Amino acid sequence: MVLFHYWNAVTPRVTAAMDKDRDMLDNLQQGILDTAGLDEDTIHRYVSFMRELRHPQGIPVGVAAERLRQWLEEVRARGQSDLLRNCQLWLNELILGRKVILVRPQMLLQWLLDGRQQDKTPVELNLILTVLKTLPKEELRLYWRELATFPYSNDVSCAVLVVQCQDLVLADLEQSQDGDTNSCRQLANTLINHFYEGVWLKNSKEEQWSLLLSHSLHLLQRIVAKQPDFATQNVPELMGLVQAYMIFGTEEASARNQPPRRVQPAQQSAAYGQDDELELEPQPSQKQRTGGRKNKTRKMRSLARQRNQSTNDVQETNPRDRVLLTGHLDYGCLTGDSGENCPVSDSAGDPQSSGLRQERNLQAKVRISALHLLGSLAKNLPRRFLYGYWHILFPSGEHGATNSHLLLLGHTDTNARCRAVALQLAAQILYGSKSFLSQASSQGPSNYTPFAMSLASSLMSSYRCLSSILEREYAPPVLTQGLKCLAVLVQATPFEQLEMGFVYEFVGHVKKLAKSGDIPVVVSALLVMEMLLSSPRLTPEMASAVGLSPSQRNLQLEDVQGAEQDYLDSDADVEFEEDAEPEPSEQSEKPTVPADQTRLPPIPRNSWLLRQVLRYLESLGTAPPIRVECYQVLLAMGTHIGLLRGHQTRLCRVIMAGLGDATFDVRLYAARCLDSVGYQLGRLVPESSERESQLSFWLHLLPVVYTAYHEAAGASLKCALCDALSNIGTFTFERLSLGHRNALLAFLSGCASDDGEEPLVRAAALRAMAVYVLHPSLKGDLVFVENAAELSLYLVNDTQLVVRTKAAWALGNISDALLGGVTQHSERISEELLGRLIQAATKSCGDHDKVKANAVRSLGNLLQVLQLQPGANSEQMQLAISKLLDCVKNASSAKVKWNACHAIGNLVRHRAFFATTHLAGILFPALSQLIVQHANFKVRINATAVLLQLEQRQDLGNHFALVWRSILEALERSNALDSFEEYNHRDALQQQLCLAIAKLLALAKAADLPGMREALEEDRLEAVRSTWRRVAYRIVPEQSAPLFTCIPLLEQRLQAETVLPQQRSSLAFVARNLKLDP
């Protein structure tokens, strides 16, 4: 039956093609017979050759292209233009239908390309295009230079075919040859000039004009992709084409007979020329010590793993980007239109309606080609160029402005595919624009509109437009694109700098779409909320929108008005969580839950997102892509732990179910969710009522984690599980029973010691052990610490950088534990193991910066342990200290430098450091250079802190004058900020430098005073004196005491010594300028 239907469907098309071929042959034969001047032998020869080319049963016939060339050349020589045209048409049909297989088609192609190129007819150009399609790809490039210089005819039909030929060859062209590069540029410039000069605007049919536009824009898109430099040099011209033709055929389009106009960048772009592809890092004041773990904020990622989406044909316009926005299909009517008021019967019964649909399809192809050209520009241009054209890509936000932009196209275009592509492209451009959008601010002067307010107005208009799209759109693929575009915009928006109100608007639409029946729409809606939760600081409006009550917010926030809260929870299905409990039949298939977990606390009414996520995760019919995204939302909620506080029992249940899921992605993201949530719960000091639930949370999860690890097939899941176990937290770990604690340690030790396991998994287990060594109950357990140390010695020499980085970090924690054990316990590590640890740390100081940053930290601690050991190896210590000093001088990473300075600061407290003079000769010049010249203020602070550890004047030797002069110069330069990010560290640096000045004044001798006065008088006296006084009266009295007492103590100490007149004059000068009144 299936074959019968297939035959009925295919037979009419085959029959029609055969009839067309037969009719063309009959007409050609009749034309030959009617042609005057042909003798009977020539007619017989022509007809015989034509019958030879066409097999009666449609079997392909092989023919030498040379014979076809000779035949066509003979017809052309006789001057029979009509006969030549009919022959070319017939041959074109035979070659396209694969009824003729050309042997050596290059012979025919070269003949067709020869001659006057301006005189080529559309039929001849069509035959050239057909022959090009028969060539192997490796031979197409041989014709590129000839085709690239092919002149464009004023006839639009001829120009379309020429552009198609060029596009066909360029698709397989290698960009390694300089000649090809020049040809591409020349061709693109010619094509652009034709458009701007309006050569083809007159006397062209609408259909041919649309075809020429779509193919030309597609050709330019290929050239831009292959020649990014050309795009950079011709941005105004290319943007003018995009602006003119991305609205082609719409109501917003201008008259067709107007050529495009060049678009110049906005003036503000010159001020923001930084090509910031990366997201802004958080300010140092917002960073917290995470125990070797970064609580990363998730960026937009590819959704290619969501294989169950309803649209499988994906076209990725920008493979570099992490956003994969699907939906480049025609939705609605089969014509590609969106289908509003478009009955199906129109396509079959009304030729006029069918013609209108075909015209709209051609116009939509033009718009899509223009959007693809813009996508290629966005991929290849630096960000600073795109920011200059923000005013044509996104709404301006001005009242009464009617500029056409991507979001307007995604809102009003009648073709669903155009709407989807426009929204995808908007997301592509918005991705990575966080640094640019961070300048937006709704507050500014009232007498004029600064750039920050204009940008904020554009942002607000973008949100309004996207909210309108979510409200009115009905096609699921377009909705998916709109939601993903909104997610990218949310991630890049500085919410705290904008006025309130717009978050409630789009969250209300996202909330409804999160309950949709379409899987991609639900996933994208949850993605928007995940991006909203990923913001490190939630405004009152954002916190209320996601359900974070004021009592659980870290910041003191104003109460949100009740009307806005009612708007968020206006759906009829909002209720307490008891109403959403699963049926008994569903519970029987879920993991066994202890009896104390069956009575669950209600979720507050405003926590709609948490309720919806838990519903999806507790439902057995939820698709894997939705489950994966739900775990990502929970992971983001962990950043604002107040959202999850008190719901550990329910979280335990859904994470247990995820770790036992049949889908690998679900298990992996459940483990990562446990990692993040466990880390945040571990940092949270639980209230007395929560202690039992937090302990129960881990007690029920530990066996499930062990089982999931042993059943895991990949290293990524095992690493995630080990990372999750490292985040139990001191509070919970110390309250585990001895049996649970020993089982946990044995499990991690076994994972880290397994020679058959991948090094990355072993390193993750070792990192978890290194977290545990700092817990109070294990810090003094020398057996466990030494076991972890042996494992780190093995992994620190691995070939993978990430493994060595984890092992070096573990070695740093182990050295912290060893140093604490030496000072608090009598039992000490063996000298042999300590020597191997110092040797490994010294070697790692020459590794990658990521390894080196942890190696210098551990080396500093280990050297302190060595100093406290009786009979310490002085040679090994000198070698290790030299390595630390080398890191201070030559390391490129700021983190390596400040860790090295911190380590040396701890070492100089011991007199053994100055046992040899050559170390001081390296240390103080290096510190002086860092204090004055290093761009990072934290490095300057740690370098200055080393000087505060000095106890005797002789430690400085003959470097006293250099250090004094460097401190004064650094204090003078501390007010000059090369980067605004250092503003938060300026006060700390100035305080540290003033304390160093006080330290040197306390250590100074009479012979040092003339040099100190000379350095102070060198055009910096006023800057040093003002900063010195400001710091002294700003900081708390406990810290400012050395600044007030250093001069009196110096004067008192020098009274007992013999002081020369010059020295006494210098002392008076220093005291007069730096002495402070209490």
Image (tube, rainbow, N blue to C red):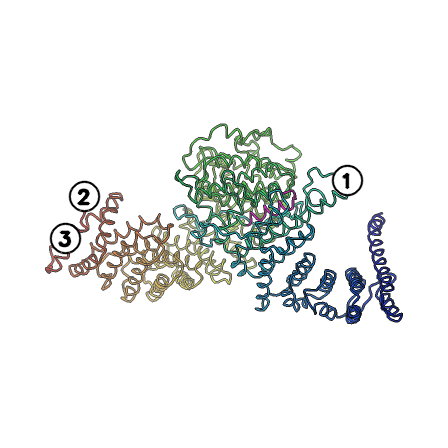
417 drawn magenta: yes
Residue that badge 2 annotates: 1078
The amino acid at mark 3 is Glu
Range of magenta residues = 413-428
* Frontmost residue, 742 versus 198: 198
Secondary structure type for disc 1: loop
Residue pointed to by mark 1:
345
Q: Is residue 241 left or right of residue 131?
A: left
Q: CA distance from mark 2 to mark 1?
A: 96 Å
**Closer to viewer: mark 2 or mark 1:** 1
In this picture, residue 865 sits left or right of residue 216: left
Is residue 949 among what the camera can see? yes
In the image, residue 455 lies at what x, y percent?
A: 47, 44
Few, some or many residues within 10 Å of mark 1 (<14, 14–19, 20+): few
Q: Secondary structure at mark 2?
A: loop
The residue carrying mark 3 is: 1051
Disc with the residue nearer the chain's start (2 vs 1): 1
Mark 2 and mark 1 in contact? Answer it, CB < 8 Å.
Answer: no
631 magenta-colored? no
